[in-house]
Amino acid sequence: MAKLYVNPAMKLGKINKEVYGNFSEHLGRCIYEGLYVGEDSPIPNTKGMRNDVVNALREMKLPVLRWPGGCFADEYHWEDGIGPKESRKKMINTHWGGVLEDNSFGTHEFMELCRQIGCETYVNANVGSGTVREMSEWVEYMTFDGISPMADLRRKNGDEEPFTVNYLGVGNENWGCGGNMTPEHYANEYRRYQTYVRHYPNEKNPDKKPIYKIACGPNADDYNWTEQVMKIAGRHMNGLSLHYYTITDTWSHKGSATEFDMPTYYRTLGRASHMETLLDRHSAIMDQYDAEKRVGLIVDEWGTWFDCEPGTNPGFLYQQNTMRDAMVAALTLNIFNKHCSRVKMANIAQLVNVLQAVILTEGEKMLLTPTYHVFKMYAPHQEAQLLDSHMEAQWIGNEDGKVRKIYESASVNDAGEITVTLANLSAEEAEAMDIVLAEGSAASVTGELLTGAITAYNTFEAPETVKAEQFTGAKVTEQGVSLELPPCSVVSLCIKMK
Ligand code: AHR
């Protein structure tokens, strides 16, 4: 019998809702078809945005969306994506699949999409092939309220009121596709570019916050990048990004998203759990330059990366999504929650039809992936206070993939309701568990469950093979709550206190 200790009196800091963020790039069928179909499409839409997808994202409580890339961001020139659609530049998306990019989805469309979803905006600017002037004019175009060439141009293009840019990324992967820079070179470029990310006050909105500036951070365990960029530019940034993808084998052989054996399952989870080490070690370096934890660690690309589905364009990165992906999401989100003192935002890659997507589409059809259900089940953690929780670790897996059996986190909201999220990573073994509350007594417990075989997934023919259901297996006890977690399962509990 496993024991999980939760202390309702020990609050360890706020879990930012932005930790549950997502990422949308001009890549494959993410933007075009996945999110945006155009106003003339037979697929039901509002101003070109798919109604089915927008509604599902609202229900999932998507808090923030990053756009336009990714590697695409450092090739993107924002002026190509404004003005009458028929006169927007057409170009080849050289990075992703060599397909035509007609720029019909640009700044105004992104802002409209976020408005419909009800989420914050995270715009990634171009440093690799763009200029300081181009970036600074984009900020002026989007956010200035007064009279200026860029604000006037925005008005001419149909939006009288400025947009809200909550987050701005100054370049993407500048150690790679964003310019192949050294950390020292990038850090100095960052200092220069960020100087011109102006804060334009707005008389009608006196509480308007300055844009939160995010510097390009390391690839996975490149600790030297973090060290140099923090040392040279740390005091000029609000956030530092981190990219880490879960690859089961090697970059040239990533393995199938749906056909895998048990050792591969555990290897994938073992690699996903490496996120914990990355957060600890990058945070320790950041602590040396920012002991007060003013700078957020922004994990703005994470998730599984498998071989794309057979028969699809390899440049589109379209992959299916099984219970294994759900377990990766569940363990990673629990890790993020527990690192909320430093991790201020995270954006799984990517929103629709690309990599570890929460939604897949095929023409007018849409399905919710197992990963979608995990995000929805974890939504009560958004803006809640992390609670101290602890359980004895049991290790499972095999030689090349050892991982803890259970990943958990707990939080309390303003109404005093406790959310506990649990992931039982074992493919075959259930886990009986007592949740012991260090203070107070539980009055009631309700829950949701997501479970299935490790390779289970949803198809357009059977879209509800894997879905969240009510969990009735948890009972209030004298000490707290007892329950049994099925094998390969995710459970979200809501505990109300007396
Ligand atoms: O998410 C796909 C790609 O992965 C992004 O464009 C890039 O930033 C990363 O390498």
Image (cartoon, rainbow, N blue to C red):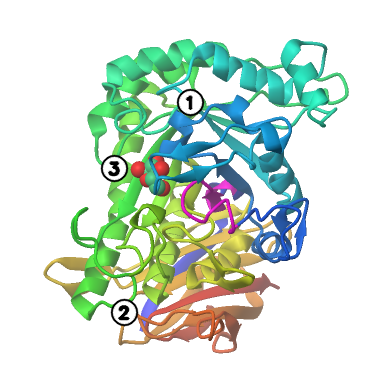
Foreground tag (2 vs 3): 3
Return the x and y of residue 167 as percentages of the image width and height: 59, 32
Q: Which residue is mark 3?
A: 220
Main secondary-structure element of the magenta-colored stretch: loop
Task: Report the Cα–Cα distance between label 1 and label 2.
Answer: 43 Å
Q: Residue at x 31, y 62 (%)?
A: 306
Categorize mark 1 by other alpha carbons within 10 Å: few (<14), some (14-19), many (20+). Answer: many
Q: Which residue is mark 1?
A: 126
Q: Which residue is mark 2?
A: 426
Residue range highlighted in magenta: 18-34
Between 478 and 455, the residue placed more toward the observer is 455
Foreground tag (1 vs 2): 1
Categorize mark 2 by other alpha carbons within 10 Å: few (<14), some (14-19), many (20+). Answer: many
User: Answer yes or no: do the residues labelled 1 and 2 have beta carbons within 8 Å?
Assistant: no
Foreground tag (1 vs 3): 1
- Magenta span contains residue 100: no
Q: Is residue 80 above or below residue 41?
A: above
Q: Which image quarter holds the N terminus?
A: bottom left
- Magenta span contains residue 25: yes
Q: Residue at x 39, y 57 (%)?
A: 317
Q: For residue 483, which numbered disc appears in the image?
A: none
Which residue lies most toward the right here? 204
